[in-house]
Amino acid sequence: DAGITQSPRHKVTETGTPVTLRCHQTENHRYMYWYRQDPGHGLRLIHYSYGVKDTDKGEVSDGYSVSRSKTEDFLLTLESATSSQTSVYFCASQVEFGTEAFFGQGTRLTVV
Amino acid sequence: QQQVKQSPQSLIVQKGGISIINCAYENTAFDYFPWYQQFPGKGPALLIAIRPDVSEKKEGRFTISFNKSAKQFSLHIMDSQPGDSATYFCAASKGGQNFVFGPGTRLSVLP
C-alpha cells in the first residue's frame, strides 16, 4: 500500500458531532486526496492537496474540510456529522500527476 | 458534471473465460484512463492504465481497449481466474489528477 495508512479504520459517531479522519503517508508524495465510496457511486473526490497548506475542493466537498500542515499528513474533518456522511472514506497519495495513485485501506464511518 | 459510466454492474464468468467491462466518458479533455481493482476490505489498487495516444495496452492477462472517437474504453481479462474476483473501477482524469471514477463492476469468477 505504498506506506499510506488511515486512522481510525472504523468509527461510529452521533449526528452533529465533529469527526476527524487521518491519512498518513511515508512516501513523501506531494499530492493527496480524500474520496468517499458509496454503492452505485464508485469513489467521489471530496478534497485534494497539492502540497503543504495547498488544498482545494472536489466534487462532494460540502460539509467537509481538510488540512495539511505536513507533507505526510492529510486530515479530513466532518464539521457536524450527518447520516448522509455514513460512508467508507479512502485517502490516496500520488508522487506526480499522471502516476499511480496509492490508496489507503479505508475508514468505515457510521453516523447514527 | 464530469461522469464516467460503467457497465455491467455485476458480472459472473466461468474460470478460463473472458471478462469484459465497458466504460464511457463525456469530457474530451480527459487524457489518462486507469483501471483499479478492489478486494473486499481493501483500498483500490492500480491494475493498468492507458493514454489516448494508443488504442490498446496489454499487461499479462489484462488488456485495455480505447476508442477515442467513441469516448469509450474497456477492460478485458483473459483466462479469468477465481482470484480475479473483485470490484473493478474505471476512471478518467485530465492531466493524471483528480480522478473521476465509474460506479464499479463486481466480478465473480466461478471455479
Image (cartoon, rainbow, N blue to C red):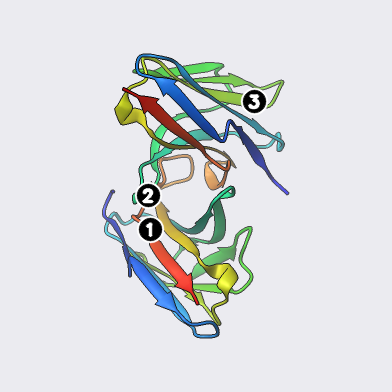
Of callouts 3 and 2, which one flags the residue occurring earlier in the amino acid sequence? Answer: 2
To which chain does the residue with label 1 belong?
A
Q: Are marks 1 and 2 on the same chain?
A: no
Q: Amino acid at mark 2?
A: Gly
Query: In whole angstroms, how far apart are the C-alphas of marks 1 and 2?
Result: 6 Å
- Residue placed under numbered mark 2 in the picture: B43
Whole-percent x and y of residue B67? Answer: 64, 19
Q: Residue drawn 40% across and 71% down?
A: A21
Q: Residue drawn 40% across and 45% down?
A: B44
- Residue A106 is labelled as 1
Q: Amino acid at mark 3?
A: Gln
Q: Which is nearer the eye, B1 or B38?
A: B38
Whole-percent x and y of residue B73? Answer: 59, 25
Q: Amino acid at mark 1?
A: Gly
- Residue placed under numbered mark 3 in the picture: B72
Query: In whole angstroms, how far apart are the C-alphas of marks 3 and 2?
Result: 25 Å
Q: Is residue A70 above or below residue B36?
A: below
Q: Are marks 1 and 2 in contact (CB under 8 Å)?
A: yes
